[in-house]
Amino acid sequence: MVPYLFLGFAALLVATALMVILHRNPVTSALFLVLSFSSLAGIYLLLQAEFIGMVQIIVYAGASMVLFLFVIMYLNLQHDVEKGAQIALRRGIGWMVGALLLLFAGLLAKKGWVSGPVAALPPDTTGGNAAAIGRVLYSRFLFPFEITSILLLVAMVGAIVLAKGRPAPQGEAE
Amino acid sequence: MAALMQNEAFQVALWAMVKVGIILGVMLGVVSYLIYAERKICGHIQARTGPNRVGPLGLLQPIADVGKLLFKEEFIPAGANKVVFHIAPILAVFPAIVTFSVIPMGPAPMFVVTDINVGLLLFLAMSSLGVYAITLGGWSSNNKYALLGGLRSSAQMISYELALGLSTIPVLLRSGTLSLSGIVDSQAGNLKAFGTTLPLPNWGIFHWYLVLPFFIFLICSFAETNRAPFDLPEAEGELVAGFHTEYSSMKWALFFLGEYMNMIVICSIMVTLYLGGWHGPGVDKFAPLGLVWFLTKLFALLFFFIWVRWTYPRLRYDQLMGFGWKVLLPASIVNVVIAAVWLYWRANA
Amino acid sequence: MIPTEWALALSAVLFVIGVVGVLVRRNALVIFMSIELMLNAANLAFVAFARQQNSLDGQIFVFFVMTVAAAEVAVGLAIIVNLFRLRETVFVDEINLLKG
């Protein structure tokens, strides 16, 4: 059952991710990205990371993508115009690079893949995945955790300052 | 086939399907009669009788309404983004239905579809998805009123979601689990305080540090479900009908269904977190009584929602945002700190 | 149980889609979305390895990556909005003031 669900979610993920980069309308791209994030959350659930799966939906689908949609609507973007030899050339190069990367990944998997040893100590999962993550987060990773809160504060201030725009220079009309 | 029936995973899935079917069917009925109740209560609050022509006491009114909506013309405005215009009403109903799968309506495992250990997070995730329906519905209609309504409501829902999420944290601190069944279990028995057992149930709301979160949650849930006094997305006086101005027929009905389903879901969560869930006298002797208690509390809260809607006037938009960001959010953060300190002190003293 | 190799292959495909998106599109917002795709591909690999190693460290890393991604989205979108105000475009090949 679980492998089939994984394959289903994986197919949905790849298809929606492709639509994100192929569709000309940015709103549609954003909506497909929401779908691909949601199917990724499903894959996280199958990989026994319930907490991460839910946070994935809350943070990406619920917050980030809403912001994206807001900005697209605010800028009132329509279909992207993509014509001309230069753009066709760039598109060709882009897909070539992608194919090369995939080839490289395949070679790596075939030649250089060594599974490492499995950790001796299984994590303490009493109370479920969320409780276990909380315990680790507030003990071993306490310092990075505090740093992230500062990072978020800085990002918040930065975003507000940037979005408010520059005040008009003295004595000059904007 | 016999081997399949023996398969444990298959049995679990089958049971879940049956429960989902029952819940879906019952929900649709409950929603249509909730609308009837709303009209009836509204009528009595305004010294009218409300619907009373179709059937005895107007009880067949919901059926007539649905029939009317089904046969109305489907209208799609010119210049609308057709695909998004169709998807938005579906998105309005979907999160509410998904959330229902984790709400314990009685003792587990019989009266809950699935008891996952991140149940509360699922509720928060789904309520954060609710923004899409309104934003997209407003944007794709190609109508200024609809767009304004959609933008207003998404700003409103995002702002109030923060306080809503923060006000659940004291509950989690007390129960120590994200599973909704676990949270209900932590509210069993009688309240113990001052070294004695009081004649009060051990519900969340009877713990002093959960009183403020309960009221913050209540206020935020008015905002989350876009109901008065926070019904700015569809403020009739200013925006015609807000985000669903251009919607008609069954698509409009889906938005309406979504609104009432969200109301039921958020009231169920409130019952689960603060009002003891399905706990009540006699449940330990006869388990199905839990369902009765749960529904009693749920309908009491729903009545309160309707009562508030027809009693308070609408807020101005800057007042609404100011209240959310400058009052509710700081208050819930302070309450989290106080509850954490108190629980830590009590556990270690 | 899902083989780790499957999840890694999926992660690789997702990452490549992100790279191609950055290379072929010229709308800054879509490029930004492709970057998010790449970050998520890395997250998927982290979760898959956490599962294989029976350890939570990978999931903790995903948590941090998500925080950074959220911060990045907030600041990045503000920058794009500012760019649009200045240049009336979100196409990265038209924003070429430094080209001389």
Image: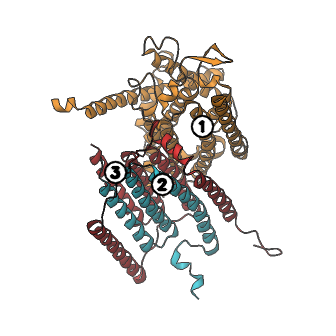
Chain colours: A red, B orange, C cyan
Q: Quadrant of residue A163?
A: bottom right
Q: Quadrant of the C terminus of chain A?
A: bottom right
The answer as to whether the residues below labels 1 and 2 share one chain is no
Q: Position of residue A62 (x, y in %)?
A: 52, 49
Where, quadrant-wise, is the N terminus of chain A in this rendering?
top left
Residue B208 position in % (x across, y down): 68, 26
Amino acid type at mark 2: Val
Who is closer to the viewer here, B198 or A125?
A125
Which residue was labeled with disc 3?
A9
- Read off the residue under disc 1: B169
Q: Secondary structure at mark 2?
A: helix
Q: Chain of mark 2?
A: C
Query: Which residue is more in the foreground, A103 or C26?
Result: A103
Give x and y (percent) for residue A154: 66, 60
Q: What's under tag 1, amino acid-wise?
A: Ile
3 or 1: mark nearer the eye: 1
Crowding near pointer 3: few (<14 within 10 Å), some, many (20+)?
Answer: many
Quick check: B325 above or below B260?
below
Which residue is at 72% across, 47% downward? Answer: B318
Can see residue B310?
A: no
Mark 2–mark 3 Cα distance, whole angstroms, equals 19 Å
Q: Residue reaching furthest front? A: A120
Q: Nearer the viewer, mark 2 or mark 3?
A: 2
Which residue corresponds to mark 2? C62
Near mark 1 (Cα within 10 A), the count class, few <14, some 14-19 or many ≥20, is: many
Same-chain status of marks 3 and 1: no
The quadrant in which residue A116 appears is: bottom left
- Between the residue at mark 3 and the residue at mark 1, the CA separation in whole angstroms equals 32 Å
Left or right of C3 in this view: B317: right
